[in-house]
Structure formats: C-alpha cells, structure tokens
Image (cartoon, helix red, strand yellow):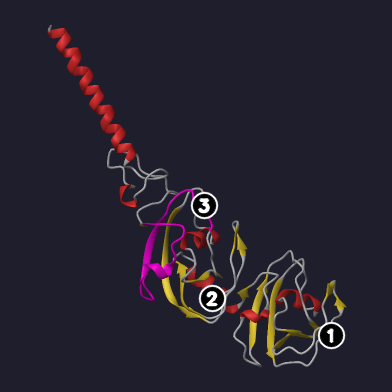
Amino acid sequence: MLLLTAIVFGDAGCSKIKNDNSTATASEGGHGGSSPENSNPGPSSPPAAPSAAGEGKPTTWEANATSLNGKDGETLTLACAPGGTAHSVWGSDIYTSDSSICTAAVHSGLITFQQGGTVTVELRSGRSIYGASERNGVTTSDYGSYQHSFVFKTPNTEALVREADDQTPVLWNTPASMVSFEPGKTYKFKGPSGGKESAVWGTDIYTLDSSICNAAVHAGKLTSEGGGPVTIELRPAESSYKGTTRNGIKSNDYGAYGQSFVVK
C-alpha cells in the first residue's frame, strides 16, 4: 500500500509540472504570443539572442515615429519583433516621422526582417527634402517638406546626417519635382551606380518632372554605370522643350511647362 501511494503521488507531481510548463510556454509571446507584455519568459528561461527583440519597448512593424507622441530631441529604444514585413518608408538616413521605424531600421542595416532587434531612435524637426535609396532589400521613397523626422542613434549618426544634408540620395526614377520650387535655387543630389532609364523631357533645360539622374547623364554630367553627385538649378517656365539623344539617353519633346531645371 505504501508503495502504491508513492506511485500515485509521484504521477500527480509529474503531471502538475508538465501542466505548469505548458502554461508558461503559452504565455511567453515571441512568434506565437499575442501580447508584447508577455514576451519575458521569466528568470528560469535562457536569455534572448542579441539579434532578437531586446529590452526596448515592443513595437509593431507598422508603427511609425508619429505614434510615439514624443518631442523633438527625445530618444526612445524600441524592440522590433522577429518575422517582420516591409512597410512604407520615406527618406534615407533621415526619415519622415510617418515612416515605419522597423522597416527603416532594416534599410539602415541595423536589424533584419527575420531576426528583428532593438534600435534607438531620436526624434528630430522636419526637413524640406527627404532622399530615397535602395539598401538591404528595402527601397525607400523621396519626399518634399515634412514637419517631423527621426534618425537612428549609432556611433556614426551625425556623419550620416551630414552626408545626407550635403548630397540628398535619389533613385534613377526620382524627378526634380520632389523639391519645393524656387527659381534660382540649387540642390545637390547623389545618384546610385547601375543606372536605370527613366523619362526626361528637354535638352539642357529639362521639365521639372524629368528624372534627375537621367537628365544628368543626358547633359554629360553623370554616367549610368558609376552614378555620383548631381547639382541642379531650378529655372522658370519654358514655352517648349526639345528632345534629343545624347550619351545613350533619349529625351522627349514637350510643349509649355511651368517649371524647369538645368544640370550644373
């Protein structure tokens, strides 16, 4: 009888331990969890890998900096969950505040979609222009004036910001119409290597909706293979624009157009 009683209590004890472990697993969060607050499995579990969402505030891949309701100059550390998906981003190194923070972090090379990770953002004031680039599987969009921005805090943050200030990165299909029009004003851009053909109207003087980089190649100021810096000057309307073929780029004819630019 004593032996039988011991066996019965022993089975009950094992069953309870199994049930407790099942409950803990269900509440851990991570890939299958439904609540970010439950992402900490407790002190008895092994620590998360460095690439996983760390000690920052859990955030979704859809979340943008506007939703943080912070003030310019404030820094916030956020944890992007593993298994993320891409969402809209405007800018390059300096991003509009309505851009997806986690997707921008992938673009910046700080985390990956597969592993997620922890990043620190600094909220900043708005800018008159935001560039666009393709990095780490993420293609961002250009934008004109926007009221608030954010950057990622890293040892080289200020160097990246200075570079973006000096030469705004653009894609080969980025038109000059992204800028605020002010005749006589100049802008400096930087085109990537490996050019792709995009529409251009005019010769020497181009319509403002022409591709910046393709116009620069047409004007002999840039090569498709190497990319590089491009400076444009905004000009007033022309009554007509004549198309020609130069340097492997065919530009198009157009009639009157209210805004134009030249490549310096």
Q: Earlier in the sequence, mark 3 or mark 1?
A: 3
Which of the two discs, 3 and 1, sits closer to the camera? 1
Residue 119 image position (x, y, % from top left): 43, 59
Q: Earlier in the sequence, mark 2 or mark 3?
A: 3
The C terminus appears in which quarter of the rendering?
bottom right
Residue at image mark 2: 162
Residue 93 image position (x, y, % from top left): 53, 68
Mark 3 secondary-structure assignment: loop
**Amino acid type at image mark 3:** Phe
**Amino acid type at image mark 2:** Arg
Which of the two residues, 12 or 193, is positioned nearer the viewer here? Answer: 12
Side (left or right) of 155 relative to 247? left
Q: Which residues are magenta?
A: 58-86
Which of the two residues, 201 or 47, is positioned nearer the viewer here? Answer: 201
Q: Residues within 10 Å of mark 1 (few under 14, many from 20)?
A: some
Q: Which mark is residue 242?
A: 1
**Residue shown at 34%/50% (left/top)?**
35
The reply to whether callout 3 and callout 1 are in contact (CB within 8 Å) is no
Which of the two discs, 2 and 3, sits closer to the camera? 3
Residue at image mark 3: 113
**Residue shown at 46%/52% (left/top)?**
116
Which of the two discs, 2 and 1, sits closer to the camera? 1
Disc 2/disc 1 C-alpha distance (Å): 37 Å
The reply to whether callout 2 and callout 1 are in contact (CB within 8 Å) is no
Q: Quadrant of residue 88?
A: bottom right
